[in-house]
Structure formats: C-alpha cells, structure tokens
Image (tube, grey):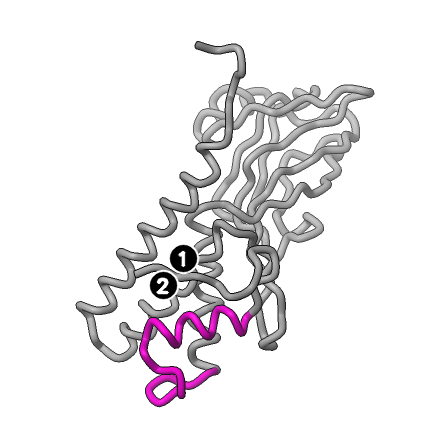
Amino acid sequence: MTIFFTATSGNVTLQNYLTEVQRLLHDSLNTYWSQPELIDYINDGRKRLVSDTGCLRSLQSLTLTQGQETYPLSGLPSGTTTIDILNLTVIWGSSRIPLQYMPFTELNARLRTWTSMQSRPIAFSIYGQNTIYVGPIPDQTYAAEVDTVVMPPTLVNLTDVETINYPFTPPVAFYAAYKAKLKEQSYKESEVFLQMYQSKVQESLRAQTMRRIPNVYSS
C-alpha cells in the first residue's frame, strides 16, 4: 500500500494527513473514528516520527557561565520542546570548538575529579533527560551553539502546515492508523500498520542518506 499526498511535499497540511488516514481506515465519513480523535493520532505520529528519526532539528543558543557545571534543557530557547542534544559547540574567540560527547559515568570519572578545576569545556553529557553537564567547569563565560532535536508544534486547524519536510511525512498516516486500530482492539491490523510505519521510516532515512557523500575524494 502506498500513500501519495495530494499537496506538494513542502506544504503538507493537517487536512492532507487526515485524508490519508481516512483512506487507510476506509472511513472517509468518520463513521468509526471522529475527526478530533484522528487528529490526536496524527499528532502522536508526528511526535513518534521525530523521536525515531531526529528529523526536526534546531540550532539553539546557550550561554555557559563561569563556575556553572550544569544547564537545564528548559534554559534553551526551545527548551520545552527539546528532546535530545546532538552536538554542543563552544565559541572561543573567533573559533568554534565542538565538544566531545561522553556518557555521564565517563565524564564524571575523567573531568569531575577536581572540584575546583575550571577551564574551557572539552566535553558534555546528558544526565537523565533534562540536564546538560559540561566539563571541565567553564573558567569564563562562553557563547555556545546547541544542535538539538525538537518536537513539532501541534497541528490544530485543518489548514495548519506541517513543519516536517518530505520524505519524512509519509510514515505519519500509518502510525495514526495503527493507533486507531489499537483503540478498536483490532490488534492484528494495528500490528500491520505499525510494521508499515516502521518500513516507511526506513524508506525516509534511506532517501536522505543515499544523497550524502562523506568524502568526495575517498575510494
């Protein structure tokens, strides 16, 4: 089964999503699932898609303060919707210095031994889901750039335009259909839609990676 959005790839709307889900469920008149219900499932699918692929990213600013080791995700400009930190780069004079990522256990062992040590940070870690650690503790104030994965804004009105771009939009309808069938307790059908969602996610990821050449001079 293949989904073709009627809108252009850059202008998928909530109405486009809704139409595709209704087609998958053979319920164009909302006989078995109400429109608000399907919209909830669509938004669930969009969040799941971003969580699975990291396809919606935002480069956010952060100020590292002298003597301060930890920074809450809520302190980022889009902190309430930030779900992951991919990279953290310190701006040092006219240079950008990418920090190495370390699991917290490693950062704790290697860079937190001396409590009074302060220097330009060389590594960062995520503690739990809400706290950024940098090490060593900053010896001065640094501007920093944080490469993040953020949740998409909720689609409410049928004319709302998707912020996720093609080729990552097709899996959403399959996830919404999965949730609808799960609610109906049609477990075999829901499992089929979930598998189709996962397959579409892999197609989306392959569609991007096949165009990336890490090094044009490599053999």
The residue that mark 1 highlights is 171
**Residue 110 against residue 46 in the figure, above or below:** above
Screen quadrant of the C terminus: top left
Residue at image position (77%, 22%) is: 92
Q: Residues within 10 Å of mark 2 (few under 14, many from 20)?
A: many
Across and down, in percent, residue 111 comes to 55, 21
Q: Which residue is mark 2?
A: 174
Name the side, left or right, on which 106 lies relative to 147. left
User: Above or below — where is 12 with respect to 149?
Assistant: below
Splitting the image into 4 quarters, where does residue 197 fall?
Answer: bottom left
Residue 19: quadrant of the picture: bottom left
**30 in the magenta segment:** yes
Residue farthest to the right, as pictured: 93
Question: Percent position (x, y) of residue 27?
Answer: 35, 82
Q: Nearer the viewer, residue 207 or 150?
A: 207
Residue at x 45% of width, y 30% of height: 103
Q: Quadrant of the N terminus?
A: bottom left
What is the three-letter code of the residue carrying label 1? Pro
**Label 2 to label 1, Cα distance in Å?**
5 Å
Viewer-proximal residue among 126 and 88: 88
Magenta part of the chain: 14-35
